[in-house]
Image (cartoon, rainbow, N blue to C red):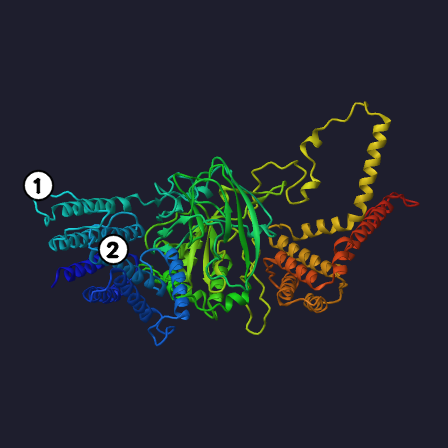
Amino acid sequence: MSGRARLAGCAAAATLMTACSLLPLVHGPAWLVVAALLVGVQAGVGAAARRVPLARPLTVLAQLLVSLLLLTLVFAREQALAGLFPGPEAFAHFSELLREGSDDVSRYAPPAPLTDGIRLMLIGGVLIVHLLVDTLAVTFRAAAPAGLPLLALYSVAAGLSGGGADWLWFLLAAAGYLMLLLAEGRDRVTRWGRVFGATARAPGAGDGTPAAPVRTGRRIGAVALGVALLVPLALPAMRGGLLAGTGAGVGAGSGNGGMISAVNPLVSLRDSLNVDSDRQVLSLRTNAEDLSDMYVRIVSLDDFDGTTWKPAQRHIVGVPDGFPTPIGLGPDVRRTTVRTTISAAESYAQDWLPMPYPPTGVRIGGNWRYEPVGMTLVGDHRQTTRGATYLVTSLDVRPTARQLASAPKPPAALLREYTDVPPALPKVVARTAKEVTSGAANHYEEAVKLQEWFAEDGGFRYDTQVQVGRGPNAIANFLRDKQGFCVHFSFTMAAMARTLGIPARVAVGFAPGTPQADGSVSVSLKDAHAWPELYFEGVGWTRFEPTPTRGTTPSYTRRQTPNSALPDPALPSRGSSAAPSPQASASESCAAGSAAPAVCAAPSEAVAAPGGGGGTPGGLRAALLVLGALVLLALPLTPLLWRQRARSRRLGAHARSDAGAAEHTLAAWRELTDSAWDHGIVPDESLTPRAAAERIVRLGELDEEAGGAVHRVADAVEQVLYAPRPRSATGVAADVRRAVTGLRASAGRATRLRALFAPRSAVRALWAAADRWTALRARAAALRPVPGGGATTGRGGS
């Protein structure tokens, strides 16, 4: 074998030995076998081209073209011409595979499933590295700098696999590189590459002595090996707490890459719920229509070992200007953009950035990094949330029950990762899941059955004093004892969902906070919460709420009846925490949420002392004129203001009791019928709620979405009025708003303007005033003396 052929073989062997460091990143070594075959063909073509001989650039070009043909044969045979020659379709297919591979790399923690995209990136990357090594070491006879692409390959593998050097793979890669240098030395190359060459020779040596280049190669090799040892150790990793700040930061990273390592949030979550004195940690100002759905998410826990859930090890990158569309979210799912300004308290310092999910962008100062799979931000260089104020844009995703029920099967790789349960999981978990969900027609119905069982039917009790539990029997013990807090409910429902084949993970963050009189929302430590997220293709990761008395039940968790497109009555509404606000309101008599903020007097107005008579008649006359002008201006807006106030009161927060929830449902129905009246549909009190709903849908020419919302509200009203054991529906306020939006969309401009500025239903204010006047007159008449006796009483004088 000639010296060049031996050197080419060593270059191929060194590349494959270094590529072995990529094995821990994916499941299975089959890709390496294919890569070895393609590297062998690439090396053979280079040897043949040099034997002809071809010019060096033509040799490299021949190897490059053959590599492209090989990749086309393996990955794009169906899109290629004659199954071998790449055309526009083949290149488009390569682009799609690379995009999918990039998404998969950021989505999965090592070892990742061997998807086609990841497979192309691995094999293509090895071919590119070998082409560089072969070109430098064999074609241009510069073996020492050929260690740089090998170093790059090893550094990428070491960084993605966790940051520290894996000694087995390091030694294998180092042995390959040293073997390449030894083969080059034995070939007695007298001239190295111009950049790394040396002109000095050993004393007394002739012109052919290779001592200087060999010595140079050894020095370069030593430097390269030292860098290979140090670079992976310098790659950043992230540690820290979830709810309580640790200030650990991400590490000594540069902000452009790194890994997230797993942490356990259970202890800090339980401690947050059991604090003796609650305190505010976040203040929110948002344009969201429904504050009951304003969950603030910190991180997702997707690694389940049978005992607990924790964040998987993930790759983190620099924060992008705009976040990508959430995985799995299809274009036909209704969504609105929400802007939320969040201010963290000075006492609240932790590494993860609380945000509504799914975020589409964030504006924040400091050193933050982005984790694409969970769509979360983490602090770098000890960056925390302490005192931070930032703006988050997010999506309010509103899927329908039909969309969830008809969701197609998720991608195989995602299904495999997020339905994985360890063998140590007690059999009672899967058995109970099957029993609870018996009769369900699809994964959506199974999820709803699980949620109802935990929240209502299963006899579970919410108790924050229960220990989290350790060991493989922790979930089994919770199913037996049926008492715990959000960690138990969310962890167990997610585990049971996985046994049913539903991709599941757990989110940790804060439940909806308490609205304040100034329009903000206060989030306190006792709002700390955990909830399960289940994946449905076409919708994405979807929140469920199994914990009783905590958070709010999602409006889309209504099962479809077999013979009707209308949803069944849903679960009882569970509003946000009823605990008193930690912030003092503007005045004791002006409760938050009971009136618009403008109605509440400012503190300066409440304590202002009356004037001492120093005012002039001219000043009093001017004040009266201004007051009269304001009254004249406000008078035409009175119907509008009254309707806005009535709508806010009817669709606002309600009590947790059944009576309070029923009253809220009836008030929402009144708001719906009044809104229809404002748009020209006069209410007919003789009709049942169902018939009235059909009439509104027909006369209002509502589309399917708005019509479904009207029927859902009518179903909720019938449950309250006629069911033996009424169960009020959740989300009726959102359904009413959806129906009103549909009425506005189908109405003309004149009708919309009249409904806004001169609503017909405002006559109810006159009717209410007339009724109160009549009642007042009746009471006054009852108190008047009766001829021949004393005053009458309201009890018939008895």
Residue 44 screen position, x and y as percent? 21, 66
Left or right: 663 as drawn, with respect to 274: right
Residue 116 screen position, x and y as percent? 35, 65
Residue 258 screen position, x and y as percent? 35, 48
Counting residues from the start of the chain, the first of labels 2 and 1 encountered is 2
Marks 2 and 1 close (CB-CB < 8 Å): no
Left or right: 632 as drawn, with respect to 641: right
Observer-nearest of 435 and 212: 212
Residue 113 shows in this picture: no
Q: Which mark is residue 203?
A: 1
At 54% from the left and 56% from the top, the residue drawn is: 553
Q: Which mark is residue 21?
A: 2
At 77% from the left and 60% from the top, the residue drawn is: 750
Rendering quarter of residue 21: bottom left
Q: Amino acid at mark 1?
A: Pro
Observer-nearest of 576 and 542: 542
